Image (cartoon, grey):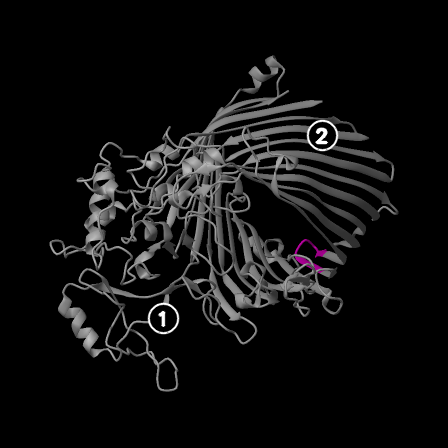
Amino acid sequence: MKVDYSFYHGWQNIAKRLEVANREEYQMLVNEASANAEPALAKKPANDSDSPLFVNNIDTDWQKEAFKTGKIQEHTLGVSGGNETVTYNVSLNYFDHTGTIVGSGPGYTRYGLRVNTDFKHQRFKFGESLGFTGVDQNFMTFVHDGTPLGYIVGAIPTLPVYDNTTKNGFGSASQTIHGSYTANAIGFNSTLQSKTDRNRLIGNIYGEYAILEDLKFRLSLGYERTDWRDFNFQPKYDFGWFYVNNIAKMNDWRGYGYTGTIEGTLSYDKIIGKNIISAIAGYSVLQSAISRVQAHAEGFSEPYFPVLSNGTSGISVTGYEEENRLLSYFGRVNYSFNDKYLLTATIRRDASSRFSRQNRWGTFPSLALGWKMHNERFMKALPFISQFKLRASYGLLGNQEIPSYQYEAVINPYAHAVFGNQLAPGATQLEFATPDIKWESRESHNIGLDAGFLGNKITLTVEYYQNTSKDMLLRVRIPESTGVYNWKSPFVNGASVENSGWEFQAGYKNTSGGLTYGFNAYLTTLKNKVLSLGYGDQPIGDGITRTEVGGEVGALYGWVTDGLFQTQDEIDQLNRKSPIGRYQEVLTRPGDIRFKDINGRDANGKLTGKPDGKIDDDDRTFLGSAIPDVSFGISANLAFKAFDLSVMASGVSGNLIYNGLRASLEYGGGWDNYAKNSLNRWTPANTDTEVPRVVMFDPNKNNRASARWLEKGDYLRITTVQLGYSLPKKVLSKLKMSRLRVYVSGQNLLTLTGYTGFDPDFGNDGLFNRAIDQGLAPNRNFNAYAGGLPNPRSFMAGVQLGF
């Protein structure tokens, strides 16, 4: 029997802060913006030194107040052993993480158990795998969907975090006193509740029988089930102005989902002289189902005990169920001749219930060829070459990952209406059907070279790839006048996109004396091109990003800036030349941004690509790529006697980011806080600047989507540094141990970038809305519990034991 135990404990923090105005700077800027309005606006009492409500004793640094040190720990215990007949492996795991924001969330706790056993007797082998995972998760809460990060950064410094005179004990802004609609994000995260519980069971059992020495049949059965509860509770609260809730509300979602699989395979492995043949054929059946119930109740009284029966109003219960199946037949052949010439051929035939009967089946073949040139006789004259392999492949993969029943309409049979003081029964269509949707396919072409030199001390891989996604399944927006919200727009096979580029990998490893060291590096290039968009190839997106045939997915789109207006005469001259009497928006004044006139229309309404004397939507253009040209990384490993050191770094280059957080802070037209950069705004005494004037409501729309907010997304990040010490074997044997290693580690220690936001590495909002930084989580799926925070910097210490 072997026993292994590992443990680490760590601390996390958000390393970066955005520079915003303090109290005095904020009051100066907001008062100036009010004075610049036409007509001028009166100062708000909190910012008026002549008012008894003037704030001069509060200067809240919201980022300092909101960001805290998070903690993370993990324990893993494993027991394994066996003999020639039976082997076993049992492991226990516990993980706990508290986030970096003050309040009830985010927090994440996971505990798990896994058991694996394998039995073998003559021609028969069977085994099982059983795993259980439980998750308790608290989310960062906020009154709106999305992230409160922007509200933390933009909160006014004249508002306190805590206020004992308010209902919930947190500071709240008054529109009449402060002007701002600031939401106290710390207060919301401390008052509201949002959590989820997940219990997941995964089981698999298999049996394998050797019919002949080279022919085996294997049957496996799998089952996975997740039971969940999502809970949200909003007590009565008053955080000022828009943020008042006079009725306590609860939502309670409960349900389960399961997936069952049956897979049977017949495999054949044979060596005939210089020929090696390996083949497999099989089938699989997969069935998945989801069932959930949502309960809602309101009117809870204090002290709160939020269960459904304690609600006094608004009680409702709704339910939902869905089911889907996937049937697959597949086969694969691997062939090698004389360890020189290699071939792999695969084919799949899949049927999915997510499509209508006429489009249910898809066929997906692949072929790969390889040539080990280093085994050829003519290569023996080059002894420094250890490996030299050429390879090429072609493959077609299918995708059916969309919600069920998209090819059928959804009807609400309870859309009743009142006519003539009587209730008339009715029904309405909730979602549009697209019965012709079919499998999305991805066609891949690769050609590559794998090489090794000097006994594979030096390795090199070079590959060119071209991947084309065809008939991509995506939602296409339709007018909301149809009664369908955008998030319920129908799925269509609406696009074809090509990605191509090069991948390079290089490595070196060596041992010299007591030092063992190695280096690895990779670099990948990417060129993206939209081949079609379906249904007339109409462009998708009309805001910050736009996707057109021939261009890139989610290219950044907007107006081009041309400096600032310095005098009223400049504005008047352009207005006189304009065919509509004005060049830009109403109330353009010195200190406002001048946008470039780059496009007009002829008498037939077609774009000419020539100025027309006015700024409108036609003057928007593509501003740059949201997709990095290059992704790269490097790692180094060194070991000297009992010490080991590893360092990893990664980065990207060649992309632009729309800095939405900076756009909100440099808006210059409201009562929320301002970026420190706004102190360099245009004034009659400060004309040598690129920052426009501050003026309430931004009449010239200086804040519009333009090149002003684009920044280079290049970065190089030190992702991991780990230093460890392992106890020598002589000492371990005396202690009857197989391993004892202690280590310290750091993650995301340093990011070299010119990007001024929190983090240049963040998630995209779908396929077409790319590189728009509004403060979302770095990865919405994996790090959803992070609640929209930047990648934290982590420091950890751990131990690994073996007995």
- Where does label 2 land, which residue? 89
Residue 214 visible (yes or no) = no
Residue 739, how many percent across, how many down?
59, 22
Residue 532 numbered mark, or none: none
* Residue 675 position (above or below residue 528): above
Q: Which of marks 2 and 1 is nearer the N terminus?
A: 2
Residue 419 visible (yes or no) = yes
| Mark 2 residue element | strand
Instruction: Classify residue 69 by image quadrant.
Output: top left
Query: Which amino acid, mark 2?
Result: Asn
Bounds of the magenta span?
335-346
Left or right: where does residue 290 sit relative to residue 71? right
Residue 29, how many percent across, how many down?
22, 47
Residue at 11%, 54% (x, y): give it: 685
Q: In which quarter of the image is the C terminus?
A: top right
- Where does label 1 land, which residue? 617
Farthest-out residue, front:
421
- What separation in Å lies between label 2 and label 1 (alpha carbons)? 64 Å
Query: Which amino acid, mark 1?
Result: Asp
Query: Is 340 colored magenta in this rendering?
Result: yes
| Mark 1 residue element | helix
**Pick the front one: 717 or 506:** 717
